[in-house]
Image (cartoon, helix red, strand yellow):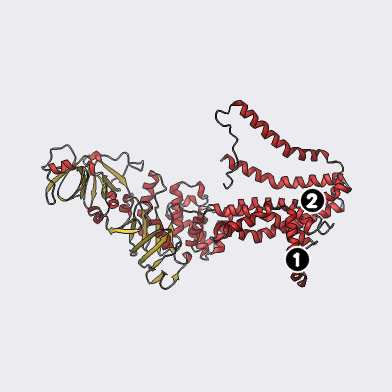
Amino acid sequence: MSGSLDARLVIRRGGFTVEAALRAGPGETVALLGPNGAGKSTIVEALAGLRPLHAGQVRIGHDVLEDVSASVRVPPGARRVGVVFQDLRLFPALSARDNVAFGLRAQGAARHEARERAEAALAQLGAAALGGARPRTLSGGEAQRVALARALVVRPRLLLLDEPLAALDIKARAEARALLRRVLPEFPGPRLLVTHDPLEAIALADRLVIVEGGQIVQEGTPDEIRLRPRSAFAAALVGGNLLPGRLLRRQGEVIVDGRDGQLAVAEPQRSAASRRLADGAVVVAVVHPSAVALHADPPRSSARNVVHGRVLDVELDRDRARVRLESRPPLVAEITAAAALELRLVPGEEVWASIKATEVSVEPVGDGA
Amino acid sequence: MTRRWVPRPSLAPGGGLATGWLLWTLAAGGLAVLGFPLAALVARVRWAQAPRLLTEPAAIEALRLSLVTSGAAVAGALVLGVPLAWILARARLPGRGLLQALVLLPMVLPPVVAGVGLLAAFGRSGALGAALQALGIRLPFTTAGAALAQAVVAAPFLIISAQAGFASSDRGVEDAAATLGASRWLIWRAVTLPAVAPSLLGGIALCWARALGEFGATITFAGSLRGRTQTLPLAVHELLQTDPDAAFAVSALLLAVSLVLIVPLGARLVVSARR
């Protein structure tokens, strides 16, 4: 049985107050996105019951986990909230298998049964061989699989992932992202993913919640936020134009084909995973706004990507202008204010954008499975 | 891990050879002052007679008594001191500084003063003496009293070591265990205890060594009654007047026991200093 997460949180931490209303449905992944110190981890701790609320309540389905006005506070162990901590927090004295079995044992499972289920959980995450290893002998990616197995094996009703990829190096990060893309859909309850990496949020989440200074400043789908960022941080998040899609090779061309359009890319050689990306791999194409050139007429440019669109709006910041386009894919261009004036960019104006294929970087987020 | 205060010998830049020479000379002098008496003691022991001297009934009795009382002192320090260490390391309470000073006090207090304090508290005319007597409990000049005197003097060594362990162990890992449904007891057994075990073992060794060597508080509160309160150090003191050869032999025995207790700790210090 899975229920929605419904939380209104007021948390005081020293002089800092975090206030947030969060909802996540069964099977929905919500990314909590924000800069360091925004209060994201504080929210995770509060939902897990490790930090008391100052006011508000937390419910999963019909069960009240915490309600300050009714003096209800279910302790962490009885909440059935699975947490993958940013620093993983594996038990150093226990083997990987016993780390995973710990929660089952704590809930009364017999030793051999707990071990068997732990082995199965590790195997499901491709970590069957790690059972006997001590945490400090594991690589970052391996330790993360163990931490994920430990959180999932007890079948929690809510899964909290606090910066699950932050501690990993680039190669391990791409693998872990692919793993999460595979594993998260199998978890039936609501999932809350804390991250400061927009790529990770877009790759894994259905909905983004942007937190700054302890407050939610915006929430919506990645597209909604990309096109209408409501704060400097949200704007900086979309500092890259991000096009999620699949990598396809056609007649010597490599393209990223997404729901919102296509972009031709150079053969990704510097991709995070060292192996060559297969056709159909799930990726995000990233284009920095300054790599988007704008033209008043169809350009005779050698750029492989030429996109026709209309100006949505123009935002001036000192000598730079951020121009948002209604186009396929939707684009944000950053040009000089002088160029923006010269092109007479006003909302509704027809415009052409060009992007060189070599300016499009490709980040793998999944194996295409 | 917890002991970073071990100084690394290094020569100040620009100090030159002369400074290096002075440094090494002073250090060697320090070592000599510490080590020479022990070497002299070992040299003075009549090894041929040692087995006979150490198996005299008086020596055996003192050894047995020492083991019993110091064992009891360590056990008491564990049962009462570890919770205290936990609270000092983890709890937020007003006047913690004062409490901390109180716990450390026996380490710097002359042991004889600790003994006088015990008399004032539990002596026949002491604050609690009458109450204890009504219950049929007598502490001064009893074996239990000797153990109590050792515990008072030695417990701080265990407490500060355990406290350092609790303070430096990762509470985040305990939180992780809590989210998995672990009871406090399971968290303590499976997570906290393994993390603090090295500190705890070090503390036990120090505490035990200190209890074994306790003299001042014991003789003040419990006297030096052969077979009841005369532990090895008290026996040495008495033997020096009656049978110096036996005194040296027993001293060498105490030295050996101390070495066994302290060498693993010393090795740990060296290891952590090299990290």
- Where B45 falls versus A42 (above or below)? above
Q: Which mark is residue A229?
A: none
Task: Name the residue located 57 percent from the left edge and 55 percent from the top edge.
Answer: B166
Task: Name the residue located 47 percent from the left edge and 52 percent from the top edge.
Answer: A128
Q: Which mark is residue B126?
A: 1
Please indicate whether residue A146 sits to the left or right of residue A330 in the image.
right
What is the chain identity of the residue bearing mark 1? B
- Where B84 falls versus A73 (above or below)? above
Give how far across and how far down residue A119 sits, in percent.
48, 56
Mark 2 to mark 1: distance in Å? 26 Å
Q: Which class describes the residues within 10 Å of circle 1: few (<14), some (14-19), or many (20+)? A: some
Three-letter code for the amino acid on which mark 2 is drawn: Pro
- Where B46 falls versus A26 (above or below)? above
Q: Residue furthest right?
A: B242
Three-letter code for the amino acid on which mark 1 is drawn: Gly
Please indicate whether residue A3 sits to the left or right of residue A289 in the image.
right
Residue matched to label 2: B233
Give how far across and how far down residue A161 sits, in percent.
40, 56
Q: Nearer the viewer, mark 2 or mark 1?
A: 1
Give residue B187's quadrant in the image.
Answer: bottom right
| Residue A74 visible, this orientation | yes
Depth order, front residue of A219/A255: A219
Task: Name the residue located 69 percent from the left edge and 46 percent from the top edge.
Answer: B262
